[in-house]
Image (cartoon, rainbow, N blue to C red):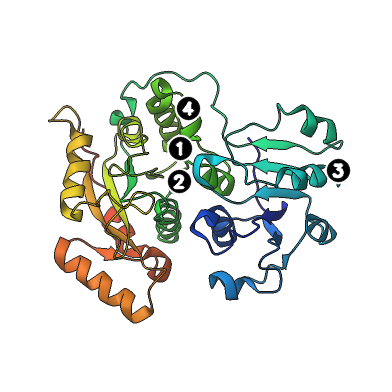
Amino acid sequence: MKCLGAGAKVALLMHGYLGHSQGKHGIGMLRYSDADILAIVDRYAASRTVREVVNLDRDVPIVATVDEARALKADILLVAVAPPGGQLPEGWESELHHALDLGMSLVNPLHRPWNADPEMASRLAPGAWIWDVRQEPADLQPATGAARELSNIRLLTVGTDMAVGKMTASLELVRSLRSKGISAEMVATGQVGITIVGSGVPLDAVRLDYAPGAVEREVLRVSESCDVAVVEGQGALCHPGASANLALLRGSMPTHLLLVHRAGQTTERQHEWAQIPDLVDLIKLHEDLAECCGTFSRPQTIGIALNTAHLSDVEASQEIARVKETTGLPVTDPVRHGADLFADVLATSIAQPSPR
């Protein structure tokens, strides 16, 4: 697995997606990656700044073409979007071919593998590479429930919809735990988190029978060296197109849960007929599924990470207070205010044995 860490010279391909919910890969990279992000390629935003488009405190140049990104010394092009179905947006393939002709490497977070594409392989320059992120890991086995025997804390983020901030909440929580001297690792389970962290399992590329086992193996691996394993959630139980939740629950055997919700949202964004349940009821449902009528240990929900990016500071504070009052749980926006509120809850559990 490649790693886009410090020293990697990256350009983000994002035509029209910077500032869009499907541009979350680029936003995640801008906010959390250690890579040197030298350019954003977005012809529709090339005359603007990052601060104007997404209100991030970054000075990364927005350019219109791959040629301009290459001139800025970027030698890796990442398709930094997450369109429905994980398909390459129409018209982008020619830009990928051109990037290869310029000697660049490619990071592919989408479903179709590019290493198997003869056209792309023929254009690959010496020393360049293609990283197909969504590839099923080798030698997977079905889950065995082994994570239940671990002594560390295993927190799973769960959400009320797709793209509400589960990865972001996970990263912020790991950052906060580490700042308190607590050893913490993130188990990335989606293409965005994997490119930021440099490890993980692309859960939506794993066959159903092996999905819990893939999560279990990764949780066991990171748990060898940390007090807290934060497992990135995927999808939502109340979303008709989501299927990863049971694999995550069984593979990680979580001791704790953190619910992630977009403030004010009442239905699934892609399916407005699908109502988001009362948050307290949804929390109980996750805990019930995790416990399965007493077969497994029941996790504790430590709070609600509220995504308030679309609200003003005053509106965000009011909504955080409202959700706290109606649920009786700790509530904060981990991007606006950090995740210390949740880290402190976990810190009190570090010396206690994990429930089994």
Q: Tell me whether the residue at label 2 lies in contact with that at label 3, contact meaning CB atoms closer than 8 angstroms.
A: no
Place residue 342 in its image quadrant: bottom left
The Cα–Cα distance between marks 4 and 3, rounded to whole angstroms, is 32 Å
Looking at the image, tell me whether mark 4 or mark 1 is earlier in sequence order.
4
Which residue does the numbered mark 4 point to in the structure image?
206
Q: Tell me whether the residue at label 3 lies in contact with that at label 1, contact meaning CB atoms closer than 8 angstroms.
A: no
Looking at the image, tell me whether mark 2 or mark 4 is earlier in sequence order.
2
The Cα–Cα distance between marks 2 and 4, rounded to whole angstroms, is 22 Å
Which residue does the numbered mark 3 point to in the structure image?
101
Badge count = 4
The Cα–Cα distance between marks 2 and 3, rounded to whole angstroms, is 38 Å
- Label 3 is placed on what type of residue? Asp
Farthest-out residue, bottom: 314
Q: Residue 185 shows which numbered tag?
A: 2
Q: Kindly identify the residue that appears in the image at 36 percent across and 22 percent down.
A: 143
Q: Residue 222 shows which numbered tag?
A: 1
Q: Nearer the viewer, mark 2 or mark 4?
A: 4
28, 277: nearer the viewer = 277
Q: Kindly identify the residue that appears in the image at 69 percent across and 33 percent down.
A: 114
Place residue 235 in its image quadrant: top left
- Label 2 is placed on what type of residue? Glu
The Cα–Cα distance between marks 2 and 1, rounded to whole angstroms, is 6 Å
Q: Nearer the viewer, mark 4 or mark 3?
A: 3
- Label 4 is placed on what type of residue? Val
Looking at the image, tell me whether mark 3 or mark 1 is earlier in sequence order.
3
Q: Horizontally, is 132 left or right of 345 in the view? A: right
Residue 47 in the image, given as x and y percentages of width and height: 71, 73
Tell me the SS state at disc 1. Answer: helix
> How many neighbours does mark 2 have within 10 angstroms: few (below 14), some (14-19), or many (20 or more)?
many
Does residue 264 appear in this view? yes
The Cα–Cα distance between marks 4 and 1, rounded to whole angstroms, is 19 Å
Tell me the SS state at disc 3. Answer: helix
